Each structure stands twice: as C-alpha cells, then as structure tokens.
Amino acid sequence: MPPKSQDEIAALRLQQAEAQLALARANVEKLEAERLATEAALRKAEKEKEAEQAKQPKKRTSTRPRSGGVGAGEERTEKVTDSPCTPCRKAKAICRYYISGRSAACVQCQEKKMKCEGGSPPVGVRIKKRKSHDLVDSDEDRTPTPKKKKVEEAPKAGPSKGKERAHPEPEPEPEVEKARPKKLAVAEGSLDTRDLFLRVLQEVSACRSEIRKLRPDMASLQEEMSELQDEVRKTRVEEARIRMELQKLDDFRNRAGAVEAYFTRYQPDGVPGIREEPEADEDGSADEQEESEQEAGKGPEKKDEGEGSGESPEGTDGQESGKEPEKTGEGSGKGPEGQGPKK
C-alpha cells in the first residue's frame, strides 16, 4: 500500500477518535450543567423559604412586665429616711432604704435580719409582699396618696395575678390564630423543598454514574489517539525518507542528462549516438515512451540525409555550404606542399 493511502487512513482514524472524544466531553459538560442547574434551583427554593419565614410575624408572647425589684433586673438605688430606726441609731449609721426593694426594713436591718423599728419607708420604696389590696388600704395614714396610684398602675404581684388570668386579654389570641395557617404553609413548602432536594440528589448521582461509565471509554479513546499519532509519525518519517530518495534519483538523472548532452555536443559525425534505454517514469506511459524513441530514431536519419545531399532548408545556400568543404580540402592539401620546399 502506498504511503499516501496509509497516511490518509491514519488521519481519518485520528479524526474519528477526536470526534468521539469531543462527543464524550460534550456529554460530561451537559451532565455537569444539569447538576449545576438543579443545585441553583435548590438554593433558590431555600432562599425563598427563608424569605417567607422572615416575612412571617413572630409569635408574640404575653407582654406583661415582670414585677419590679432586684430579681427583675432593676438597679438597686438607696434613699435616706427621715425617721431612723433604733439599730441604726445605736450603730450611729444612716438609716437607708432600698428604693427598688420590696421590704420595709432599712439596709442595716436587712443585713442583720432584724425587725426594723424605724418609720415608714420613703416615697418610691415598695412594701414587703402584700396579699391583697386591703393591706394597702389598712396601712397607716402616713402612707402617701400617690402610692395607691402607683400600686394601681404597676403590675400586680402574688395572688392578684389570678384575677388577671381569670380575665385574659383577647388581643393575643387572634394573633396566634392568624399565624397558624402561615406555619402550615411553611411546612408544606418545606416538604416541597425536601422532595426537590431528593430529586437533585438522585440526578447528581445519575450524572456521576454516567461520568464513571464514560471514563473507561475516554481512556480507550485516548489510547487509540496516541497509537494513531504514533502511526502518523512513522508514516511521515517514511514519506520523508522516500522523498529524499526520489530527490536523489532526480539529481542523478539531471547529472546523467548533463553528461550526455556534453558528449553529444562534441561527438564526431561517424560515431553513432548513445541510445537511451527506455525507463518508465512515474507519471509517463509506455505509448509515450515508444513515440519518443521513434522520434529520436528519425532525427539522426534526417541529419544523415541532409549531409549526403548537401541540401538545407534554405535552398541554394545549402548547396554552397556543401561545396565549401571541398574547397577547404583542396586548400589544405596544397598548403603543406607549398610549405615543403620552404623548409
């Protein structure tokens, strides 16, 4: 098989392998794009869910303020009383009350856990736990009037909470009822996102399995491509070697032609010309070679006829040219005779 056909076959095989490899890569890229699209859809669904949850009103708890005091996180501030108690007098200390405290004892009595014998606490200091409003009403007349207003305005502590629980406010209940259907809608949306997430996982697993299946095919195609590339390199090397040999042969023919032309140029008339052996060229045919041989054979015959007749295509000039060698011959014969006696 000639090298051109082998080179073409190798090139076709290489093109086929490259096309198969490109198809496999396109399939892998398509699967990756599908996986990315599913992941983007899942992220979008999660963002929508988070936005819906953020838009929903939070469940309101009862906004009843906790009873004041140190336990409620209030700052403890002290205030000096006008009527000190006996322990404070004995200790020669200032009788002070906690403004935020609940007991009617002063600071020193609270520290020593003694019964405070001092007067009533100043304005702003709360009394110890009260069981009912009657205790407040039955207090001494020293208690200031604004204290009742404060007690009425402040949240009630102790058993009085039961009265408030017996008459609950109707406002928070409808808010909870309104929030319920939204919660149900969120739950349904979460189920949809779960289903979507499962579908995405299934598609991703399918894509990965297809990629694993295509990997051995890609490896085999790459091996075939490497083999075809090696074959192409070998054929190219052979083609280059053959071209070098042909070039050498052409150089040899050119040299032989030049030598032959040189000898035919200085060949005498009586010696027959060198006959060229017919050689079949790559591009020529046998008929053309025979015609060239016939033309080459007729050429010298015509030349001999022209020499014998002394005629030339010019007519009379050819005859004159034929007579010239005789005259030259006679002159040449007489020359040496005339020169003989001179010597």
Image: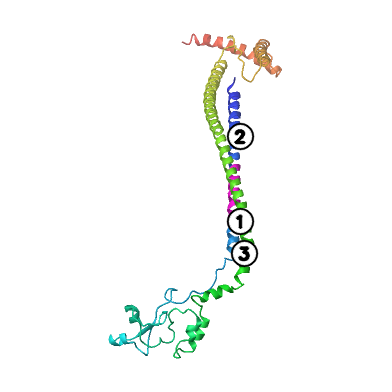
Mark pair 1, 3: CA separation: 13 Å
Mark pair 1, 2: CA separation: 50 Å
- First in sequence: mark 1 vs mark 3: 3
Residue 187: assigned label? 1
Mark pair 2, 3: CA separation: 61 Å
Q: Which mark is nearer the camera, 2 or 3?
A: 3
Residue at image mark 2: 19
> Within the magenta stretch, is there residue 306?
no
* Label 2 packing within 10 angstroms: few (<14), some (14-19), many (20+): few
Residue 144's spot in the image, x, y percent?
Answer: 46, 89
Residue at image mark 3: 179
- First in sequence: mark 1 vs mark 2: 2
Quadrant for residue 220, please give it. Answer: top right
- First in sequence: mark 2 vs mark 3: 2
Q: Nearer the viewer, residue 199 or 215?
A: 199
Residue 76's spot in the image, x, y percent?
Answer: 40, 78
Name which residue type carries label 1.
Ala
- The residue that appears at 60% across and 70% down in the rendered structure is 172
Q: Which residues are magenta?
A: 30-47
- The residue that appears at 56% across and 11% down in the rendered structure is 332
Name the quadrant of the N terminus. Answer: top right
Main SS of the magenta part reads helix
Name which residue type carries label 3.
Ala
Circle 1 sits in a helix, a strand or a loop, which is it?
helix
Total labels drawn? 3
Q: Is residue 25 above or below residue 137?
A: above
Quadrant for residue 322, please give it. Answer: top right
